[in-house]
Amino acid sequence: MAKRLSKKFSMNPDWRGHPPFTEETRHELLQYVTSWRPSELVQKTYGRKPIRFLIFGPSGHGKSSFISSIKSCLDGEIGQGAVVGAGMAQVSRQYNEHPLIYKGEDLPFVLCDSRGLHEEGGGAAIDGIRMVITGQFQQGEIMPTQREMLIDPAMPFKATDLPLGIIFVVDATKSENLRTKHSFALYLEKIIDFLNDNEIPRCVVMTHTDAVVSSDLKTTFSNKSLETAVDSSGKLFRVPKNNVYPVKCYTEETGTKKKVDILLLCALKGVLIAARHRAEFIARSNTRSQIRDHGFQPLGGRASDI
Ligand SMILES: Nc1nc2c(ncn2[C@@H]2O[C@H](COP(=O)(O)OP(=O)(O)OP(=O)(O)O)[C@@H](O)[C@H]2O)c(=O)[nH]1
Ligand SMILES: [Mg+2]
């Protein structure tokens, strides 16, 4: 009894509320993610194209691994969805839209892989990133580095060309170090300013949780070192702490695991909730501006009153 009590009181309290790591939670999260659909108004506004979520982050921090892991989680089997590196610099150089398939059907959104941010010598050019955000890059096109950037980025774009979310991916063991790099902070600021100006929701997916929480992923939300990493990742990408999602990617597993899936699905659910709010806002603003353009008369008022 004394032993049980001392174990109980030696555990850290959770720093974030979270669902239990049970099979039921995995099932509920999977249900949410796979049944997520944009409303009719949003579908009408955005057309038939899948909704885009862009993945940005420094090279080697796990962007492609996160995409692959989400695919494996939906599939129930480990596969190689996006090419992942092992000790290589700058593996992904292209812009790549990855469809997500559940039980043979495409989900209405895609995860878009991209070239690493600002790695010495070969990071993605800021103007190239702006072009990816505004939908001016085709599937498979190589994203230029600052040196290679020759294209005029000043192309007009519509609100519906923009993604409904940016997912910054960062390695939990490296975020603190990145914060001290002045050149990276300046580079990131330009990207964040552009996202703010266009009101694009963003969050952080923090990979390598397993490297910090070495014992059991169940202790993710009570581990103090991980809380510190969540804090510094939030400050680095200027998102509130509750929009930083710790995950572990599938790296050496041969089958999917309940706790790994739960962390991955919690992250994706957070992205989808933010996207729904933004999409509804754009769809309604779009409808209002069409009403203005066409001079429709709404019930109880003249068009000029809107
Ligand atoms: N232990 C552990 N390793 C991870 C995790 N996520 C990614 N990795 C490893 O980190 C390395 C880099 O992962 P990638 O997914 O290729 O990183 P990337 O951001 O796509 O890199 P670039 O394509 O070069 O920009 C690989 O060796 C992965 O296996 C994680 O959550 N835990
Ligand atoms: Mg990659």
Image (spheres, rainbow, N blue to C red):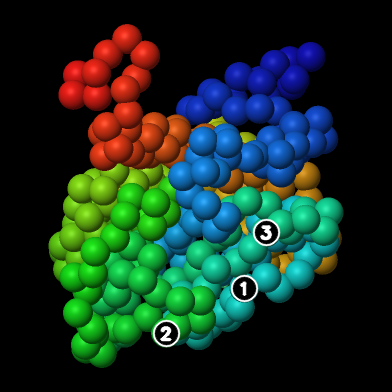
Amino acid type at circle 3 is: Leu
Q: Which mark is residue 142?
A: 2
Amino acid type at circle 2 is: Ile
Q: Secondary structure at mark 1?
A: loop
Query: On screen, 285 above or below 14?
Result: below
Q: Secondary structure at mark 3?
A: strand
**CA gap, disc 2 and disc 1:** 15 Å
Q: Is residue 250 visible?
A: yes
Badge 3: few (under 14), some or many (20 or more) residues near its Cα, within 10 Å?
Answer: many
Query: On screen, 241 above or below 165?
Result: above
Disc on the earlier residue, 2 or 3: 3
- Judged left or right of residue 154, residue 67 is right
Name the residue located 77 percent from the left edge and 56 percent from the top edge.
Answer: 105
Tag nearer the camera, 2 or 1: 2
Amino acid type at circle 1 is: Ala
Q: Which residue is mark 1?
A: 82
Query: Which quadrant, please, contains the C terminus?
Result: top left
Quarter-of-image position of residue 151: bottom left
Badge 1: few (under 14), some or many (20 or more) residues near its Cα, within 10 Å?
Answer: some
Residue 304 in the image: x percent, y percent? 18, 24
Residue 90 in the image: x percent, y percent? 44, 82
Residue 17 in the image: x percent, y percent? 55, 24
**Label 2 CB less than 8 angstroms from ligand 1:** no
Residue 100 in the image: x percent, y percent? 67, 59
Query: Which quadrant, please, contains the N terminus?
Result: top right
Query: On screen, 268 above or below 248?
Result: above
